[in-house]
Image (spheres, rainbow, N blue to C red):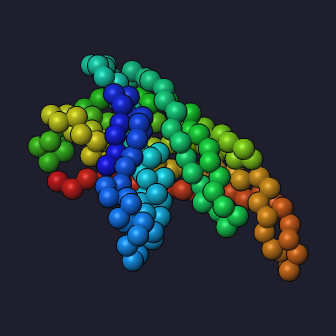
Amino acid sequence: MVNLDREGKLISQNVLNRDALEEAEGGPDLLNFHETAIQILNPLLTPLPNKTIKPLEKWKAERPLVVKTPGGERKAKMDLEFRYLGVRTLDERDEALVTFSGTVRGPATAGKVHGLVIVSIPSGVIRQVILRAEVELANMEVAVEGKRERIPVQTLMALTLKRGS
């Protein structure tokens, strides 16, 4: 279960019967999968203003980003600016379109991010989020011709969350 505040920030995430899962065969693997899924989905949790907004209105938010590398995880933050574009009708359904862009920052980590959010007007449910992040990881240790070297590595992350009809 995932709990969010009014601004879309993750308050807590719980696994029901965690103790039983830790003891069950395959349970630790399932818990590991759960943690990975939360890390992947967390950047896609889009904070929406709890008010009526006008086309081209902007707001800012910070979201966490975890980049998995062969040397472990790199934790970073995304400083994002959201912009409400307006409403479109698709398949007789009214949807709000929101774009976002910003920067990625963290220890030995930097980059840019942008994307699109589609929100169902009647329900306020986020129907789709598309996120693209270009991230540079400084000081990645890699093997080059049998020697360990530290080099900068650039990675492209593309994440999409889409709800069914």
Report the quarter where the C terminus lies: bottom left
Which is more toward the observer, 15 or 103? 15
Across and down, in percent, residue 66 comes to: 57, 51
x 60%, y 60%: residue: 68
Across and down, in percent, residue 37 comes to: 43, 58
Name the quadrant containing residue 90: top left
Locate residue 68 relative to residue 93 in the image: left or right: right
Is residue 88 visible in this depiction of the protein?
no
x 68%, y 57%: residue: 154
x 11%, y 43%: residue: 92
Locate residue 5 relative to residue 90 in the image: left or right: right
Which residue is the extreme one toward the left?
92
Across and down, in percent, residue 48 comes to: 35, 30
Locate residue 156 relative to residue 27 in the image: left or right: right
Q: In this rendering, is residue 148 above or below 46?
A: below
Q: In this rendering, is residue 67 above or below 109?
A: below
Across and down, in percent, residue 162 comes to: 30, 53
Could you tell me how many numbered marks the image carries?
0
x 35%, y 36%: residue: 4
Q: In this rendering, is residue 13 above or below 96?
A: below
Which is more toward the observer, 73 or 31? 31
Which residue is the extreme one toward the bottom?
146
Is residue 121 visible in this depiction of the protein?
yes
Locate residue 25 relative to residue 87 in the image: left or right: right
